[in-house]
Image (spheres, rainbow, N blue to C red):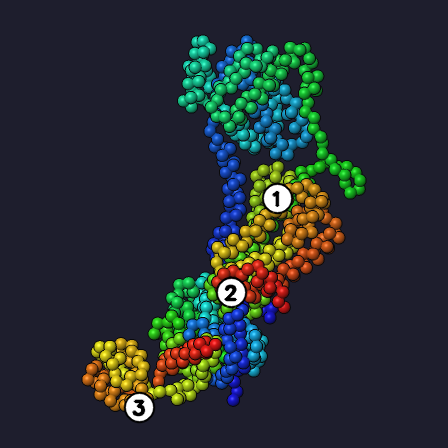
Amino acid sequence: MDHALTLTGVTKRFGSFTAVSDLSLEVPKGCIYGFLGQNGAGKTTTIRMVMSIFHPDSGQITVLGHPDAAEIKDRLGYLPEEKGLYKKMKTAEIVAYFGKLKGMDSRTANSKARELLTRYGLGDWLDKKCEAMSKGMGQKVQVLGSIIHEPELVILDEPFSGLDPVNRDTMKDIILDMKRQGRTVIFSTHGMEQAEQLCDYVMMIHKSKLQFAGTLTEVKKGRDLGIQLDYDGDGRVLAELPGLSRLNDNGKHAEIYLEPGADPQQALRWLVDRVTVKRFDYSEPSLHEVFVRTVEEADAKLALAGSTH
Amino acid sequence: MASKTLLVAQREYLDNVRTKTFWIGILAFPAIFALAIGIGWIMQKTKAQQSYTVLDLSEQKLGERIEANARANDRIASLRRFVEQAGASEQQLAEIDAIDITDPTTWLDKVRGAEANVDPSKAAQLQRMVESLAEKYRFVPPAELGAAEGSQDDREKALRERVRDGRLFAYFVIDGDPVADAAKLTYVCNNLTDDALKDWYAGAATRVIRKLRIAAADIDPRTARHIQETITWKPRQVTASGDVEDVRNEQKANKFAPVAFVYLLWIAVFTAAQMLLTNTVEEKSNRIIEVLLSSVSPGQLMAGKIWGIGATGLTIVVSWAVFGLIGVEIGSQLIPKIAEWNLTAIARDPLYLASFIGYFLTGYLLFAAVLVAIGSVCNSLKEAQNLVQPVFLLLMIPLFAMVPIVQEPNGLMAKVFTYIPLYTPFAMMNRASGPPAPIEYAITTVLILVSVWLAFKAAGKIFRVGVLMTGNPPKLKEILGWLREK
């Protein structure tokens, strides 16, 4: 298969701290790929290495068939985790400026900037200065600045952080539009919902090490099925459910995992007597559950390895 | 590759140049400069009139003669200044200088005669000059102060009272026989810092008493004047062909011109370098650097910034130069004397002009490299300010060396400064009136270009790592480590 990005045994250390350890990964062309992991897990370092801002201590990175992203900067789009704009520049100007830096000619960049901003709901802001915008609007402007030159591969570091639902939807639209045009999108996120809804593939790094990578189905395969419960009532009783193994209670929604051999039907009956059940769904676990379980398992493994030393 | 540098430079330039504050700042400099000159002039003009009186107890009643002499002297001084500014010949000036104001019978006619030669259209101007000088000090007759009659003690008491209540600035007492012995002259005043009135009156008293003493000693007035002549040296210089010629004001101005240029150069380099530092730190704290680095290399980004802000600095300098030329033009129209200095010719001198532009660019580039490197490792302006303080102190030194170097443009100190790369642009500009030998121009040009190149290389290495760093600024050891990296 043709890959937009390949990492082979990539390791990066800062002094004695290992930020990314022996990471191997393949990102197929034309997909949406989610990078998951806790803060400080190594996602941003990985992305910066892909963008040739950092260089790996060992291992190889191939971006769009090239060993060095610096040589094909104009074919890549990048939204860093630390996002900023020139406050005194007008929105259309700054988006066009990013386009010009990627090699677009001035006229095309200007008209494309105005078109993009208008298409994604910032038509009233074309000639206003960036400093007047809210954070969410600024973030949209930044994303548009990173895709104006129609890159083949777009890497967005935390594109959803700090956005309200409306802007989050716009961000989703932008990402989906990119995919529909046949481009590859990689984004990192803490939001499991967005990853679950958008991604064809996900990978997760925990404490510098790759935990899993693959399609959502692959990632969830072999994990326990769980109960997705929407309910009204006092959620404290849920913890007393017979045969309960794990519970993620959100107040109105709960994810319930049973001991091996426990019967979901019995659980349903038990629940109906105690809370108002609005939706009961026995299905594969959410990405959220997979994420949390992976962190727990990995930490347990590390603790065990630490105690045997 | 280069086009991206150009894009960055263009953005930096436009970002600065199209703001209102930028142009206000440019205008403010000459405006403040003009104001500073103007304030001194206004203070001079608006200085309160000083009232004084004279308690004349002398046997010869010298008070009246001294008063008349002081006023006559003022009138002639005004006249002399006026005709000199109007470009009078040496002979005309000598005629005025020859008027003997101690001779009450002749001086007035002679002054009137000289005044009659003044261009009638400008006579009113001269008249105003004379009047304004006469108004500086006002003589109040003792009678108006209640000090005309009575014993010396009573009269002085009345005057002391007037000085105390402020109606009188000061009073003079002429007692005894000043022609024989001037020990009994007193000046009573509570302002201990402004001696102008005392000196003005003393000048007139000296002239009057000296004249009387000469007469008493039975010396021929012509002999006396001869003895009293102030000796001056007529400045001349050796020309290229080995002859001697008179020194003209214009040539003197030409020799001192580099001081003005160095000062302007210094302000321009300082301003531009400071802008670069602020800009780099802001951009870094704005978090925009990483976005830019996905499109341009750190080297391109740094070069773009330096050129863009360099162009901004050049815009400032050129604007000031234009204001300066306009100022000189206007000044020459108003005051003929300024025209004589021929400042516009100096400003247009190709050696000065080329030196200025060339040394602005190289001087700026050198300091820019240092400051952009400092800016790149700092997270806030506060941090940066602490770090750049030593750099700015280094930058101050050429200012102190300015006058000594212009006095001895090819001296040891000038030469030492010339070969310290950070100071080469300032020192060479400073020495332009020398001017240094062509070989020195050649050596320093190579020296400074190599220094700029090295500084850029080093700054590039620091910038590359520095701009992406957050947290504490790196230690010197770490920075040296970056410099060793390939």
What residue would you read off at disc 1? Answer: B400
Q: Confirm whether circles 2 and 3 share one chain.
A: no
Q: Which numbered dot is residue B469?
A: 2
What residue would you read off at disc 3? Answer: A261
Q: Which of marks 1 and 2 is nearer the N terminus?
A: 1
Residue drawn at (43%, 82%), measured in percent from left and top? A202
Question: Measured from the top left, where is residue B383 in percent x and y?
Answer: 50, 56
Question: Measured from the top left, where is residue B282 in percent x and y?
Answer: 48, 60
Against B43, residue B311 (above or below) is: below
Closer to the camera, B79 or B25? B25
**So how many labels did they put on this image?**
3
Q: Residue furthest front?
A: A308
The answer to whether mark 3 and mark 1 are in CB contact below 8 A is: no
Closer to the camera, A285 or A100? A285
Against B208, residue B304 (above or below) is: below
Q: Mark 3 lies on which chain?
A: A
